[in-house]
Image: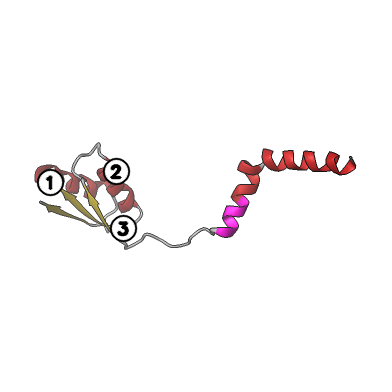
Amino acid sequence: MLVLAFVLPTIFLVLLFWDSLICPCILALVYPQSNKSLNQRVVLITGAGRPQGIGYNLALAFLQQGCLVVLWDINAKDLKEAQTTLSLATHPNSTTTSISA
């Protein structure tokens, strides 16, 4: 009976703190954080012509991380406009290259 009085609260506490405490600690041990930088990595993004689109915003985020970004879109006019605005929105040493189909 004494063992049961100890085991049940222990199981309850493990289940209670599993998501917030135990699982993140286990994941940190199994999958350590990477110190790799995205600086000077080449990223190809398709569908980057629309300023409201996912591709455009991904390109902006990768440029801010220091990546070399290749933009690719069907619409050449939107692609040229996106290239211009992305070049102005990021730091001067980042580059964008546009390729239209």
Instruction: Tell me how many marks there are.
Output: 3
Q: Residue furthest front?
A: 1
Q: Of label 2 and label 1, which has the lower sequence position?
A: 2
| Type of amino acid at the residue the image marks with label 1 | Ile
Residue drawn 11% across the image and 43% down it: 75
Q: Secondary structure at mark 1?
A: loop
Q: Secondary structure at mark 3?
A: loop
- The residue closer to the viewer here, 25 or 94, is 25
- The residue closer to the viewer here, 75 or 96, is 75
Q: Residue furthest top?
A: 52
Dominant SS in magenta: helix
> Which residue is denoted by mark 1 in the rendering?
74
Checking the image for residue 12, the label placed there is: none
CA distance for labels 1 and 3: 22 Å
Percent of width and height locating residue 84: 17, 47
CA distance for labels 2 and 1: 17 Å
Q: In the figure, is residue 35 to the left or right of 49?
A: right
Q: Secondary structure at mark 2?
A: helix
Residue drawn 25% across the image and 44% down it: 56
| Type of amino acid at the residue the image marks with label 3 | Cys
> Which residue is denoted by mark 3 in the rendering?
67
- The residue closer to the viewer here, 32 or 37, is 32
How many neighbours does mark 3 have within 10 angstroms: few (below 14), some (14-19), or many (20 or more)?
many
Range covered by the magenta-colored residues: 25-30
Of the two numbered discs 2 and 1 in the rendering, the one whose residue sits closer to the viewer: 1
